[in-house]
Structures are given as C-alpha cells and as structure tokens.
Image: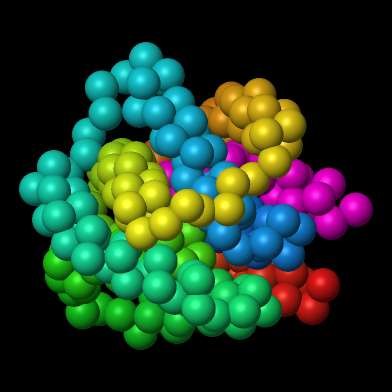
Amino acid sequence: MLVAAACAGVVAGTMLQAATGFGFSLLAAPLLFAAIGPEPAVVLLLALSVEVNLLTLAGERRRPQPLLQPAAVILACALPGALAGVAVLRSLPAAALQVAVTLGVVGTLAARRVSSAHVPAWLAGGAAGALTTSTSTNGPPILLHLLGRGAAPSQVRDTLTTCFIGLAGIGAVALFATGDPELPDGTLTAALMPAVLAGHLVGRRGFARLARSDRYEPVLTAVLIVAVAVGLIGAVL
C-alpha cells in the first residue's frame, strides 16, 4: 500500500511540476522516503527528475526561456552543498529525514508569506545542493530566488527546470564520489518511467492557462500546502 501511494505521489508530483515548474520532489519524496528508504528514494528521484525536466524543456514545441546567469550561479554553488547533503543523508535516521522534508516545506511557506527580500542566487544554490542529496526537495530556495527577482511564470518554470537537470547530475556525482549509494529496485524504476511521461502530458496542459492568468503564485502556494500534508502523513507512516 505504501509503495502504491508513493507511486501515486510521483505521478501527482509530475503533473504539478509540468504545470508549474515546481512540486515534483515535494510531493513524491515524503512517501518514497517512507516506502523504500531515504537513500534509494534520493537516487530514484534524481533519475526521475532528469526525465521530468527534459520533457519540459525539450518536449513542448516551444523555445525555453531560462534565466541563464542566475542558473549558472545556482549550479556553481550547489556542488559544495551537495557534498554536505550526502553527509546528512548518511548520518541521520530515516524518520529525521522525513521530518526535515516537511519542515523545509513549512519554512518555504513561511518565507513566501513574509518575503519581500531577495534571496541571492549563491545562497539558493548552496541550499538547493544540500537539499538535493539529503531530502531531494531542492526547489524551494530556487523558487524563492526567482520570485524575489520578479521573474515571469515562463522564466520561473524554465529556470527551475534547467537547474533541476543540473542538480540531478551534481547530486549523482556527489553520491557516487563519496561511496556506493543504495540503489532503488530496478522494476520499480522501470515502471515509474512511463508513469512520469503520462503525468507530464496531463500536467503541461495546465501551464498555458496558468501562465496567462494571475493564479500562478497562488497555485504554487497551494502545492506547498499539499506537500506539508503529504510530508506529515509520510512521517507518521
């Protein structure tokens, strides 16, 4: 039952990320952590993240609009953070990591409510790198940076997507360079690949509508609230 719920979380997270550029790991990570353990979950999420984000950038018959300068700074600052995140992943128990996922989302919600200050790209990058290899929920600091600089919805979505692809590579290098990571079940990984594709095809239809409306940021906030609820359920289970 828990594995089935985790798979449903992966598909729902894919749909949300296709629609907003954000939310895949926040929804998928808590239940995957509970179902298969932290380290296999992080490896699986890194692999699926590459598929999700390549589909966004290359599969939509449009020219992506990432903000390349902040993306480059974020990724450059992510590597030392990713190495620190590996140490956290391998030193804390699973329950503590699940709680950390939820607390990170709560912190993001609080920051969104009070944040008019700009989160610098270097800080967003370091935090995202650490979160990539510890909890895989690396989107919030990058999102705060992009919203703080007033980026348009299409720029937010495409910059997040570009950063997530780079962070997946950085996370993989950090994990394998510091030891042999515990890998997820191959059958589960193979089954989730087409499920991610289906979720993306559904979710990307929502992006065109959101980008033309004033509901983009409220939807992102709603995603964070749902992620908090899912994280609490995963921690209890």
Q: Residue 8 magenta-drawn?
A: yes
Q: Is residue 135 magenta?
A: no
Task: Residue at 54%, 80% (x, y): give it.
Answer: 92
Report whether 172 appears left or right of 150: right
Relative side of 157 to 100, left or right:
left
Predominant secondary structure, magenta span: helix
Residue 187 visible in the snapshot: yes
In the visual, does 104 lie left or right of 223?
A: left
- Tell me, what colour scheme is on the image? rainbow
Residue 82 falls in image quadrant: bottom left
How far from the left and from the top, in percent, is residue 168? Answer: 38, 45
- Which residue is at 61% across, 63% downward? 38
Q: Report the magenta residues as a range.
A: 1-23
Query: For residue 34, which quarter of the picture?
Result: bottom right
> Where residue 50 sits in the image (x, y, percent)?
43, 35
Task: Kindly tell me whether residue 125 is visible in this rendering.
Answer: no
The residue nearer to you, when weighing 84 against 210, is: 84
Q: Is residue 191 above or below residue 94?
A: above
Q: Nearer the viewer, residue 63 or 173?
A: 173
Q: Is residue 164 above or below residue 35?
A: above
User: Which residue is drawn at the image coordinates 30% and 80% (left, top)?
Assistant: 115
Q: Is residue 73 above or below residue 84?
A: above
* x and y, in percent, of residue 125 in the image: 23, 63
Which quarter of the image is occupied by the C terminus? Answer: bottom right
What x and y, as percent, mark residue 227? 62, 65
**Which residue lies most toward the left here?**
69
Outermost residue on the right side: it is 1
- Please give the name of the residue rendered at 33% of the width and 43% of the height, measured from the top-left corner: 169
